[in-house]
Each structure stands twice: as structure tokens, then as C-alpha cells.
Image (spheres, coloured by chain):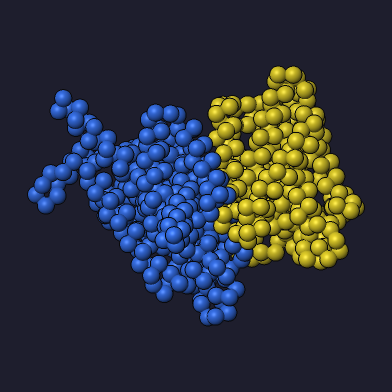
Amino acid sequence: MAFAHWVHVDYLYFASYTILQFIVLATAWNILGGYCGYVNFGSAAFFAMGAYASVFMHKFYPLPIPLLIVIGAAVSGIAGLGMGYLTLRLRGSFFAIATLALAVVLQTLVVNWDFVGGSRGAYIIRPETLEFAGFEINYIEYLFFLMLSLAVLALITARTIERSQLGFGFATIRDDEMAAEATGVPTLLVKLIATTLSGAFMGIAGTPFPYYIGYLQPSSAFGLEYAVNSIAMPMIGGTTSWIGPLVGAVLLGSAQQYATVTISSAVNLLIVGLMLVGFVIIAPNGIVGLVQERLRHWRRR
Amino acid sequence: MDISWDLLLNAIAAGLLLGAFYAAVTAGVSISFGMLDIVNIAHPAFVILGSYIAYFFNINFGVDPILVSIAALPFFFALGCGVYQVYYLSFEKRGQDSLRGLAFFFGLLFVTEVGLILVFGVDYRYVEAAYIGPSIHIGIVDLPLRMLVPCLAALALFSGLQLFVTRTFVGRAIMAVSQDQLALQLMAVDPIRIKRIAFGVSIATAAVAGALLIIIQPVEPSVGREYIGRVFAICVLGGLGSMPGTLIAAMLLGVVESLTATFYGPSWAPAVSFGFLLLTLAFRPAGLFGR
């Protein structure tokens, strides 16, 4: 009886970890996609960069996860900066296409790189417990609280950006880049800040992933569900404020956790895809937009 | 370094055949992205849909895959017109085509892929035809008919499209709408109708490209993703909207990929197109034949 109870609690931590991870990913995507209007299709690539940075360090010189997170953030932040530098001076769609291709190429690279496991994948032995300030805590709980603080950090960052001058810079670029440039917004610099920040947070979401899953192979790190969810969650939740990705990630994330257990995972991805198409056509401002509209309507009466 | 000449010649020949096929896959994107400025990243998914239709009729009724694709042209044309109508009403007309339009096509790509997985599963599927297997030998060069037939079909498709856009009224109107939509409107041509036809034609090419793909290699639903990078790399390298540029860029990519696969191993081939794309964007964003 007690055993069953503990398994149940462990599962809750596992499931919540995934949802928190999606909150970080969706918020990261939204910093560039929602605030600036530049679409990144390569979320899986940035996520995998973080994950593989930690596999590389694990084999090379093991470090505690918080340090790995800093490394993962740096690697994928620099990748974001490089991608942005090459493509953001051109039309917006070129950036989107380049990120789409980036995922394929990075996967090719990892498949051919034997040090991090190649196509066979890499095992990461996760300790059962962790010594922390004299207390012994369960490793799953540790990972959960780590991801929780990362999600809070991501949301605080997004909210701070929204209310800062940088956020206004982002919004001017989204609304009319030409006009922004003409009124003196340093558009290229502002866009590069956005791609770097967004890439870094996607990497952050991926860094603890090998420790969570225990065995990392290219097809799981570059999984389609990361690319589609990190776009679908903000789009369905609403892209204009930090609440949107949070709402989208919690709703879609928990629905998927439930559906993967009860229905097949293919059907569940199909539903996410259909919801994405439906929402962009019918409710362009997402759930947050719908709620705001209703509130406005209600107040007027 | 000692390079084996027959290996090199064979790699170049295979690359040219492959390149012509890439041109057929890219032709549709050259119209939608190059001329209409619609970033249809779902195009490869429609190509895979074409592959599965060819597969279905080939396995069940023994029809030649290329014939199936020709019969499927009107349906793909209608599908393209329908997709454009939704795209126009929900995004272009409201002036929100960039972010949400991209998400829309991404969703379509995704739904098509997962839909095919649900119907056909994730196993590799292939077709049967008399020309799959034998090869022609010219000197030391082997030309497998499995590659040669798609190459010829692709060149025929491409010449047809080139004649269509340069010689017919609708084709010229498509070129015109890509240059100046307002001017076209002033000459009493409905630009939306022209764009709808053009997008229909672009999706129709996916039926043929799909049949050619499944002749060349076994297909599973996620194969399309490998083509997204290739297709846009070719489109950008060739110069947006230039059909001859697209053909030359496709041949070039085919040859470089084939050389890479021969001398460094096939697992590196997908990286080539990305290199092409980044180099083009960094040094000559207008492409080889750009306006």
C-alpha cells in the first residue's frame, strides 16, 4: 500500500517535470516569436543542444546540474546569436527556414558524433538520491524543483522584458519593422538580443533532460513534439503576454500527459496539430485573447 | 590524393539525376515561395502524400506510379486552391500572414505527417514497376533506370511549367502578380484568382514529385522533413522565382550531395543543403539568378 503510494507520487513528479519543461520551452519561443514576430521552427535543435551539452560534459568532466545549465544556456544562446546574425538582416521568413534546416543538420552532426553516443544514444546513470545541506533528497524531486525554479526564472524574465524598454522595442519590430528602424530602434541589435535569449532558455530546458530520461538518443532529443509544442503552446495560449505560453503549456502539457497514457501518442500529436491550425485561423490571439475579449464584453454591459 | 575516376564520374552522374528530381520537388515551392511569397513549408508533406497515393494505387491495382500522379493532378490542384482560399481569408486578407501563416503551414505539415502515420504506419513503403531494377551502362558510368526515369519525368514537368509561366496568359499573370499586384488589379485581373490558380499548380506538382520520390527510394511519413531544408536551399540558391535558376541550383546540390555521400558517407548528405543555405544567405541572399 505504502509502496503504491510512493510510485504514484514519483509519477506525479515525472509528469509535472515534463509540463514545467514545456513552460520553459514555450516561454522561450514566445520571447522571439510572440514579442518580435520571428518564427523559430528549430526549438528541438536548441533543446537538443542543451541536452547534448550535458551529455558531453557528463563524459568529459561531470559537473553538478546547475553548472551544466549555465553551459547549456551559453551553447544554445551562442547558436541563436549566430543564426540570427546570418539571417535576420534578410526577410523574416529566411530566419524561419534556416531554423527548420538547423534541426536536420544538427541531428546529422550528433548521429555522426560517437563521443556523445552517435545514433546508438548515450546512457546517463542517475544517482538515486542527492546530498543537499545535510539532507538526503530523492533525485526526481531534485530535478522537479530544479525545473520549477527554471520555469519561474523564465516567466519572470518574460514578464520583465514585457514591461521594459526592450519589450517595447520587440513590439515595434513585430508591428512594423520599417517604422521601428525609422524612429531609431536599433532593430538588428534588439532582434539579436531576442534570438540569443530565446535560444539560451530553450537550451536551459534541455540541459537536465538526459538526467531525467536516463538514456538519450538523437531521435528523442530532436523529437518532433518539442518543435510542435513550443509553437502550439504559445499560439493556443496567446502570444502577446507571458501568461499565454504558461496557460498553453499547462493545458496542452497536462492533456498530453493524460492522452499519452490513455490514447496513443500519435493521435495525441495529431490533436495538437489540429488545435494549432484551428486556433491560428479562428482565435488568432489564443485563449488569453478570448478571455480578454469576453471580459471587455462583460464590462461594457 | 588518389581519386578513383570511375567513382567520381558515377557520383557526378548520380548527382545530376538526383538533382533533376530535386528540381521537381522544388518546382512547387519556387512558385509558392518564389513568386507568391507564401512560405509553404508544408510542401514536402504534400509530396509525401503524393508518394502514398502512388503507392496505394500501385500496390492495389498495379498502376504505374507516374500515371497515378498524372491522374491525381486535378485533385492536388483543387487541394491547393482550397488551402490557398483558407490561407487568404484567414491570414493574407487580415494582414497577419507572417507569424500565423507560418504556424498554419507548420500545423498542416504536422497534421499530414501524423495522419499518414495513423493510416499507413511508420514502415517504409515502396512501389513496383518494370524500370525499378535494371540499369543502362554508358562506358564506365552506370545509370539506374530507377533514377533515370524520374529524372526524365522531372525534366518534362519542369519544361512544362517553364512554358506555362512564360507562354500562357495565366502563367504570365502569375509572373505579373509576383512583381506588382496593384498593377495587375488596375488591368482588371483579379490577383486573388491568379494566386489561387498558381498555388493550385504548385501543389499539383507535389503529386508528380511524390510519385518520383517513391520510385527513387522507399518512403515513410517523416521522410518529408529531410526535404524542407533541401527545397528551400535550392529555392534561395537559384534566386527566388527563377525557374531556370531553380533547375541549375537543384543540379548543383544533387552533385555536391552525391559527392559527399560517395566520399564521406551517406549520413553526412543532409548537412550539405544546410551549408548551401547558410552560405547563400550570408554571401548572396539574392541567389545565383535573383532579380
In the picture, measured across the screen, residue A165 lies left or right of residue A102, that is left
In the picture, measured across the screen, residue B183 lies left or right of residue B125, that is right
Residue at 76% across / 41% down in the picture?
B77
- Vertical arrangement, residue A295 with respect to residue B46, above or below: below
Which chain's colour is yellow?
B
Residue at 68% across / 32% down in the picture?
B51
Quadrant housing residue A76: bottom left
Q: Quadrant of the N terminus of chain A?
A: top left
- Vertical arrangement, residue A164 with respect to residue B263, above or below: below
In the picture, measured across the screen, residue A139 lies left or right of residue A120, that is left
Counting from the top left corner in percent of width and height, residue B248 is at 76, 52
Counting from the top left corner in percent of width and height, residue B165 is at 84, 52
* Residue placed furthest toward the left: A134
Quadrant housing residue B14: top right
Which chain's colour is blue?
A
Q: How many marks?
A: 0
Residue B63 visible to the viewer: yes
Quadrant housing residue B53: top right
Q: Which is nearer the eye, A119 or B204? A: B204
Q: Which is nearer the eye, B109 or A216? A: B109
Residue B175 visible to the viewer: no
* Residue placed furthest toward the front: A301
Counting from the top left corner in percent of width and height, residue A26 is at 42, 52
Residue at 43% across / 57% down in the picture?
A298
Residue at 66% across / 58% down in the picture?
B93
Counting from the top left corner in percent of width and height, residue A207 is at 35, 50
Q: Quadrant of the C terminus of chain A?
A: bottom left
